[in-house]
Amino acid sequence: MGSPLLTRRARSSLALAASAALVGGSMLAASPALGAAPGPAPTALGTVDVPLVDVSPPGANDWSCRPTAEHPEPVVLVHGTFEDMLKNWSTLAPYLDARGACVFALNYGDNATGPIRDSARELASFVDAVLGATGARKVDVVGHSQGGMMPRYWMHHLGGAKKVDDLVGIAPSSHGTQGLIVAYPDGTLGTVAGTENPLCPACSDQVAGSAFMQELNAPGDTVRGPSYTVISTVYDEVVTPYTSQFLVGPARQVTNITIQDLCPADPIEHDQSPNDPVVHQLVAHALERPGPADPAYRPSCLPVP
């Protein structure tokens, strides 16, 4: 069988680095950690020698924002591996802001390539800063890919659960990935499994069955208190199989959603799922009601401005 040709995600340079990390091949060096807490924003060199500035997405990180009765919990957005807050949340942050939420986002873990346990501690500090600035008792957390999984380590192992009302994971690596889906020249599909990668500890942590994944999920997928909503796509080629993203828990606490069950024609895949209008509606619905998303909720499948 010939050399595999990577699917849509690998067509961007950033995604190509991600796939190289997953298979343990050569990869680009990650940038230093960037934080989004109040105060001067640092800068750093990125993976392709382009300056990466700690720029907030539109609608996020207004530290004077105060929660309202309609939106009592600030929303904390947590990006995925090889991403940053601006790239991941340039559409969802202003969408939630326009609905009246206080929205915050952070950069963490050397573009989320560092050890996930360390990234969880960065998230803990950031959430404490948000709670201190807003006066809120709890936050809602929305994360993509690693960012939808890593908060559970903070919640379940570092005492963060008491500070969270809702966790919404968009294509989260809840139980790791069995491998990046690739298309071979003969038209067949296969997977490339991850291996130990010292340049991207988070990639190794996210391989299904890794020591980190075993530790993360040993107590169970959920803990008492927070509500959990998972939003997945059948076209996910990074966190595979896509059903591994689902969480096990009581229906009053957990809702697992497959986008194509609601909108069969939606072609969204892993990388762009945070920008999907259907995903935006599902996230807002989950955050704006008690408990997780209602399984009976039906978003508009037409493009939403």
Image (cartoon, rainbow, N blue to C red):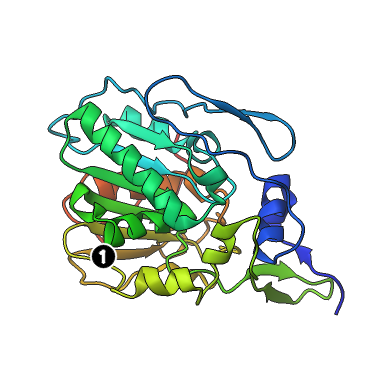
Residue at position x 34%, y 38% in the image: 126
Residue at position x 37%, y 24% in the image: 38
Indicate the quadrant containing the C terminus: top left, top right, bottom left or bottom right.
top left
Q: Quadrant of residue 5?
A: bottom right
In the displayed structure, 174 sits above or below 135; it is: below
Indicate the quadrant containing the N terminus: top left, top right, bottom left or bottom right.
bottom right
Where residue 232 appears, x then y in whole percent? Answer: 45, 61
In the displayed structure, 134 sits above or below 292; it is: above
Q: Quadrant of residue 253?
A: bottom left
Task: Decide which of 263, 67 is in the foreground and name it.
Answer: 67
How busy is the neighbourhood of tag 1: few (under 14 within 10 Å), some, or many (20 plus)? many
Where residue 19 appears, x then y in whole percent? Answer: 68, 59
Q: How many marks?
A: 1
Relative placement, left or right, of 11 versus 61 is right
The residue singled out by tag 1 in the image is 254
Q: Secondary structure at mark 1?
A: strand
Relative placement, left or right, of 104 versus 210 is left
User: Can residue 4 be seen?
Assistant: yes
Residue at position x 80%, y 69% in the image: 4
Task: Decide which of 224, 300 is in the foreground and name it.
Answer: 224
Q: Tell which residue pokes out farthest to the bottom in this image.
A: 1
Where residue 214 appears, x then y in whole percent? Answer: 42, 75
Q: Tell which residue pokes out farthest to the right in this image.
A: 2
Where residue 193 appears, x then y in whole percent? Answer: 65, 73
Residue at position x 75%, y 69% in the image: 183
Relative placement, left or right, of 189 versus 125 is right
User: Can residue 145 be seen?
Assistant: no
| Amino acid tagged 1 | Val
